[in-house]
Image (cartoon, helix red, strand yellow):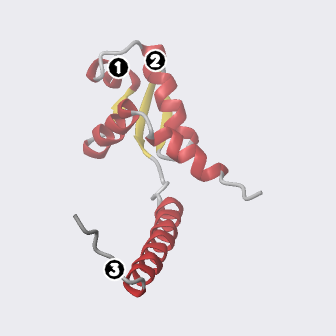
Amino acid sequence: MVQYQPLDTTFAALADPTRRGILEHLDRSDATITELADVFDMTLTGITKHVHLLERAGLVVTEKRGRVRYCRLGGNTLDLEAAWMARHRRVVAERLDHLGAFLDREPHHEEEP
């Protein structure tokens, strides 16, 4: 069986709209956990869980300075995920091309009223 662990982790992290929102927010500027909790109207515990999932996927990096945890975008550039999607897109396109060629070869019968 093919292992998709890195893809699974990334896609699971991206599946949630709050986590995608966190990434968009961090794309504009770094933020603390407290700032993110305020922006998304969540508890510190809730936002920390979201950030942890993003961190496991390499999409976010956190750094603790004193009592404050700072968040910034991580190094995962989604190259692996984009390559997987491109391969999948090619397979689907090839199948549709084969279906189109098959349908073009088949005689067309028009129904009579």
Relative image position of residue 26 (x, y in whole percent): 32, 40
Say left or right for 11 vs 108.
right
The mark closer to the camera, 2 or 3, is 3
| Front position among marks 2 and 1 | 2
* Nearer-N-terminus badge (3/1): 1
Which sits in the foreground, 101 or 25? 101
Would you say residue 61 is visible in this rendering?
Answer: no
Q: What residue does disc 1 label?
A: 37
Question: Which residue is outermost to the front?
Answer: 113
Query: Which residue is denoted by mark 3 in the rendering?
Result: 108
Q: Nearer the viewer, residue 102 or 63?
A: 102
- Of the pair 71 and 113, the residue shown nearer to us: 113
Placement of 100 over or under 5, stated as above or below: below
Q: Are there few (<14), some (14-19), or many (20+) residues within 10 Å of tag 2?
A: few
Earlier residue among tags 2 and 1: 1
Going 36% across and 33% down the picture, which residue do you hit? Answer: 17
Vertical relation: 57 (above or below) 38: below
Left or right of 76, for residue 33: left
Q: Which mark is residue 99?
A: none
**Considering the numbered disc 2 on the image, is that residue within a helix, a strand or a loop?**
helix
How far separated are the C-alphas under marks 2 and 3?
59 Å
Mark 1, Cα crowd under 10 Å, few <14 / some 14-19 / many 20+, is some
The three-letter amino acid code for the residue at tag 3 is His
Pointer 2 with pointer 1, Cβ within 8 A: yes
**Dots 2, 3 in contact, CB < 8 A:** no
Pick the quarter of the image with the N terminus.
Answer: bottom right
Circle 2: residue type: Gly
Is residue 55 visible to the viewer in this orientation of the structure? yes
Residue located farthest toward the bottom when viewing the structure as drawn: 105
Location of residue 34 (image quadrant): top left
